[in-house]
Image (cartoon, grey):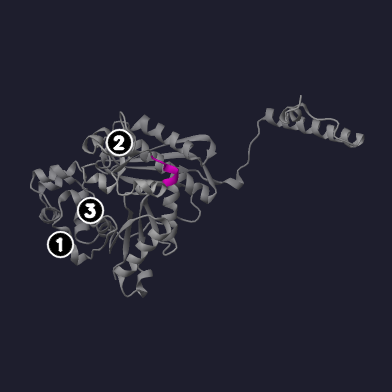
């Protein structure tokens, strides 16, 4: 029996968060990001998209396309807080959840859905309840594999709900333009179009015939794409274990890029997420690892270990971005990840005093005991340490 895999994608998440904070932004052309040199669009509203504004676009170009565009600076802490509300709600329904990014997840609803008579009505209820609880809007894709669920959530936006079964692939997916195929990047799509692969159906046909030109463009990834289009993709959900030895998160970028501001903002978001999860678990770590995947989906890892354990988002980000700048600055990448490693429980952390600190602490303790003893004999608080007098503002 096939599994029921669900992909839930929050619609224009950063913009929606800003609309929740400031309802006057609703139904307006809004972009989250920074204006100026190197500024890029992190997310934009659907109204802005009507003018050609897109995520990853230089903000200066976005303003040219849409002169009345409202630019809002990102508030990552608020986005992470809203993301937690989203995850907590879905977790109240099923514990089999895989975090895909701050605004999307995969979940296995196979057991949950067994008792439901109307699948679409059930997921419409989830969509509606999420909105009522958090004011967040989402699109939901349902299918037997993660690929089909992901294609389903992209099929209708915003607030879409699409079920794609294996038998629906030719009818629903084949007519779509090749750039709508999950896994085919914006740089790969033009190369495929150049050789006549204009739709997902063209790609499926070419892969079935082992077309050499297509195989040369896609490389080893062509075998995975072929499985996906035959309904044989992965249906495994990778959940987070109760006592993690490391806490990390990764995300696939909207397109291949070496744009520093795009990658920097992504690392900031991931660092906030990792920090929040570590704090929730009561964990601190002293190793940061970053992962980047290049345009061929090859993963590259770099890490750094430091003396003091931490779970602070700024500490995690600073180490992560330094690792990126030192190793991958000019590499076009498709995905990035941040992991906090060598975790220990905060309650088990022992503060190691230096010999000087110990001597100073011991001397202060002896002085305090002596003063307390004299005050007891004099029956009053007649003596204080100089540091206590300064602290209380006395002269």
**Cα–Cα gap, marks 3 and 2:** 32 Å
Q: Quadrant of residue 381?
A: top right
Which stretch is magenta?
Answer: 74-79
Q: Is residue 274 left or right of residue 383?
A: left
Residue mark closest to the camera, 2 vs 1? 2
State the predominant SS element of the stretch in magenta: helix
**Residue at mark 2:** 40
Q: Of the numbered discs in the image, which one, if any, rests on residue 224?
A: 3
Mark 2 burial class by Cα count in 10 Å: few <14, some 14-19, many 20+? many
What is the count of numbered marks? 3
User: Alpha-carbon neighbours of circle 3 within 10 Å: few (<14), some, or many (≥20)?
Assistant: some
Visible in this render: residue 338? Answer: no
Kind of element beneath mark 1? helix
Instruction: Please provide percent x and percent y for residue 276.
Output: 48, 47
On the question of residue 141 being in view, the answer is yes
In-image side of 111 versus 354 (left or right):
left
Instruction: Name the residue at 41% across, 41% down.
Output: 75
Q: Where on the picture, by quarter, is residue 294?
A: top left
Q: Earlier in the sequence, mark 3 or mark 1?
A: 1
Mark 1 sits on what residue? 170
Could you classify mark 1 by the number of other residues whose Cα lies within 10 Å: few (under 14), some (14-19), or many (20 or more)? Answer: some
Q: Is residue 100 above or below residue 393?
A: below
């Amino acid at each position: 029996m096939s599994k029921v895999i669900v992909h839930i994608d929050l619609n224009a998440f950063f913009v929606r968060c800003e609309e929740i904070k400031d309802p006057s932004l609703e139904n307006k052309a809004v972009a989250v990001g920074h204006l100026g040199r190197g500024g890029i669009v992190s997310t934009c509203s659907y109204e802005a998209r009507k003018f050609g504004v897109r995520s990853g676009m230089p903000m200066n170009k976005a303003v040219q396309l849409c002169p009345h565009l409202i630019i809002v600076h990102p508030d990552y802490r608020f986005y992470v807080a809203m993301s937690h509300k989203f995850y907590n709600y879905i977790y109240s329904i099923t514990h089999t959840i895989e975090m895909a990014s701050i605004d999307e997840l995969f979940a296995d609803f196979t057991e949950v859905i067994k008792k439901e008579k109307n699948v679409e009505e059930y997921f419409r209820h989830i969509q509606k309840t999420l909105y009522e609880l958090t004011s967040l809007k989402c699109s939901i894709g349902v299918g037997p594999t993660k690929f089909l669920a992901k294609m389903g959530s992209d099929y209708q936006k915003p607030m879409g709900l699409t079920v794609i079964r294996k038998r629906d692939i030719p009818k629903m997916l084949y007519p779509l333009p090749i750039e709508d195929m999950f896994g085919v990047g914006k740089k790969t799509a033009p190369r495929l179009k150049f050789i006549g692969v204009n739709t997902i159906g063209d790609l499926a046909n070419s892969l079935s015939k082992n077309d050499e030109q297509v195989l040369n463009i896609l490389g080893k990834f062509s075998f995975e794409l072929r499985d996906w289009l035959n309904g044989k993709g992965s249906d495994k959900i990778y959940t987070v274990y109760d006592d993690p030895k490391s806490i990390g998160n990764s995300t696939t970028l909207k397109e291949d890029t070496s744009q520093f501001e795009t990658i920097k903002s992504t690392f900031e978001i991931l660092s906030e997420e990792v920090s929040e999860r570590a704090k929730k678990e009561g964990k601190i770590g002293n190793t940061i690892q970053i992962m980047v995947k290049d345009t061929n989906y090859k993963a590259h890892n770099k890490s750094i270990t430091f003396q003091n354990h931490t779970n602070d988002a700024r500490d995690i980000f600073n180490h992560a971005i330094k690792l990126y700048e030192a190793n991958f600055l000019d590499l076009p990448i498709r995905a990035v990840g941040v992991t906090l490693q060598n975790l220990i429980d905060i309650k088990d952390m022992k503060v190691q005093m230096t010999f000087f600190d110990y001597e100073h602490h011991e001397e202060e303790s002896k002085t305090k005991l002596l003063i307390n003893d004299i005050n007891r004999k004099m029956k009053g608080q007649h003596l204080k340490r100089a540091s206590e007098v300064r602290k209380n503002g006395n002269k």
